Image (cartoon, rainbow, N blue to C red):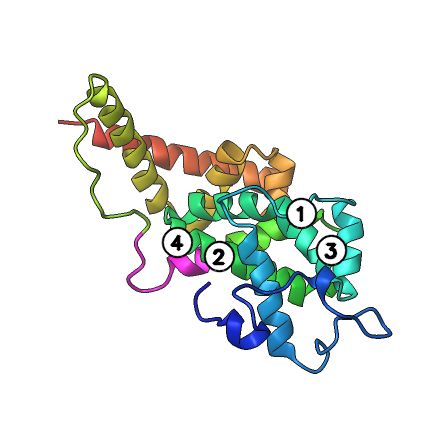
Amino acid sequence: MRGICFVALFGCAEPPHPDLLPRGEKGIPLGWEKSPRWRLSTLLGIVLAHGMSGPPVIEASGTDDELMARVAGGDAAAFDRLAARHMRRAVALAQRMTGNPSDADEIAQEAFLRVWQHAGRWDGGRAAFTTWLYRIVMNLAIDRGRRPGWSPLEEAGDPPDESPDAVDRIAERQTAERVNRALAALPDRQRAAVVLFHQEGLSLRQAADVLNMGETAFASLLARARSALKSALSAGDGP
């Protein structure tokens, strides 16, 4: 939980759950309206609690639409439930786009903080919550990839493996690494098209909505991405 001292802020090692905070007449935890830092830090604690490791902290209840309506009204418990339901998927999507687990965690956290901050802008009649969330994650991942010095692949080597099937595993890993390098070399939107359609399993329409484009245009983008990947991998098979 980098950069936040929960002991200093709350008197405990981790942020208290919003349901446990004393509330005022409007049902809003006391001090939240007057202390944006406290409110944001508590929400960040909720986001971090729903990372890749361990089971969700809270059983998700209510539809995404219902929860988002409550989040737009400042309901942190509803935000907690959304994070429990969708955080792991957001991290996985970010990691497929960046190839970097650390960046993926940060991107997913930032995406959910933006969900909280801009919940009032979401229109369920225009896009499903997951489409809106995926769009936020995609944009953040693309922005991260454009930063100077960014690297999509981990550079640390693996320890030697002397088991009988080590050769097969090495070959599989090398193939995966070739695909990842070819994918990372694609233009941003082509890489996004492959990730959304082939890795996330979205339909043409769903993936097109995430990228805010028509189905025909998305199909063309995906075809170009496939062709580029095929060319890159074929070139790697040469002498």
Secondary structure beneath dot 3 equals helix
- What separation in Å lies between label 3 and label 1 (alpha carbons)? 10 Å
Question: What residue sits right under mark 1 in the picture?
Answer: 58
Secondary structure beneath dot 1 equals loop
Between 53 and 96, the residue placed more toward the observer is 53
Between 225 and 173, the residue placed more toward the observer is 173
Identify the mark at residue 107; answer none if there is no mark: 2
Q: Name the side, left or right, on which 145 lies relative to 155.
A: right
Tell me the mark number nearer the camera, choosing from 3 and 1: 1
Identify the amino acid type marked 4. Ser
Tell me the mark number nearer the camera, choosing from 1 and 2: 1
Question: What residue sits right under mark 3 in the picture?
Answer: 78
Question: What residue sits right under mark 4 in the picture?
Answer: 102
Q: Estimate the x, y position of residue 163 in percent, counting from the top left.
A: 20, 21
- What separation in Å lies between label 4 and label 3 (alpha carbons)? 26 Å
Q: Are marks 2 and 3 in contact (CB under 8 Å)?
A: no
Quarter holding residue 150: bottom left
Q: Earlier in the sequence, mark 2 or mark 3?
A: 3
Quarter holding residue 43: bottom right
Q: Which residues are magenta?
A: 141-151
The image quadrant where one finds the C terminus is: top left
The question of residue 159 being in magenta is answered with: no
Q: Are marks 1 and 2 in contact (CB under 8 Å)?
A: no
Identify the amino acid type marked 1. Ile
**Residue 124 can be seen in this image:** no
Tell me the mark number nearer the camera, choosing from 4 and 1: 1
What residue is at 30 percent from the left and 41 percent from the top? 181
